[in-house]
Image: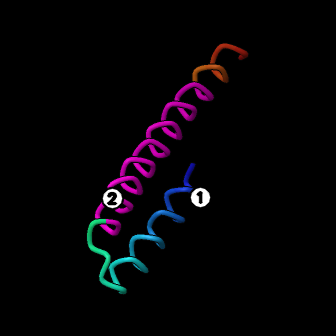
Amino acid sequence: MLKWAIIFLVISLVAGFFGFTNISAGAARISKILFFLAIALFVLFLILAFTAGQLVF
């Protein structure tokens, strides 16, 4: 998911460079959503890993 966020970030930068502002804004919004979703999933799985580790011991 983080890979897709980076891809949309690059699309946004290239579109902005060439003057396609609507496409750039849309790609930037998608990139932000995917980035924060990836961070949220990372934190969730990190918490689950620690709680599962506590249950084993």
Query: Please, is residue 23 above or below residue 52 in the view?
Result: below
**Dot 2 alpha-carbon crowd within 10 angstroms: few under 14, some 14 to 19, many 20 or more:** few
Question: Residue drawn at (48%, 73%), measured in percent from left and top?
Answer: 10
Q: Which residue type carries mark 2?
A: Gly
Q: Most prominent secondary structure in the magenta stretch?
A: helix
Residue 25 appears left or right of 6:
left
Whichever of labels 1 and 2 marks the residue nearer the N terminus, that label is 1
CA gap, disc 1 and disc 2? 17 Å
Which residue has dot 1 on it? Answer: 3
User: Can you give x and y, in whole percent of width and height, for residue 25 in the image?
Assistant: 28, 64
| 9 falls in the magenta region | no
Question: Residue drawn at (57%, 32%), measured in percent from left and top?
Answer: 45
Which residue has dot 2 on it? Answer: 26
User: Can you give x and y, in whole percent of width and height, for residue 52 in the image?
Assistant: 65, 20
Query: Please, is residue 10 above or below residue 45 in the view?
Result: below
User: Can you give x and y, in whole percent of width and height, for residue 4 in the image?
Assistant: 55, 56
Of the pair 8 and 50, the residue shown nearer to us: 8
Residue numbers of the magenta segment: 23-50
| 45 falls in the magenta region | yes
Query: Please, is residue 24 above or below residue 43 in the view?
Result: below
Residue 23: name its quadrant: bottom left
Q: State the SS at label 1.
A: helix
Q: Which residue type carries mark 1?
A: Lys
Question: Residue drawn at (51%, 64%), measured in percent from left and top?
Answer: 6
Of the pair 33 and 25, the residue shown nearer to us: 25
Question: Residue drawn at (39%, 53%), measured in percent from left and top?
Answer: 30
Query: Please, is residue 47 above or below residue 6 in the view?
Result: above
Q: State the SS at label 2.
A: helix
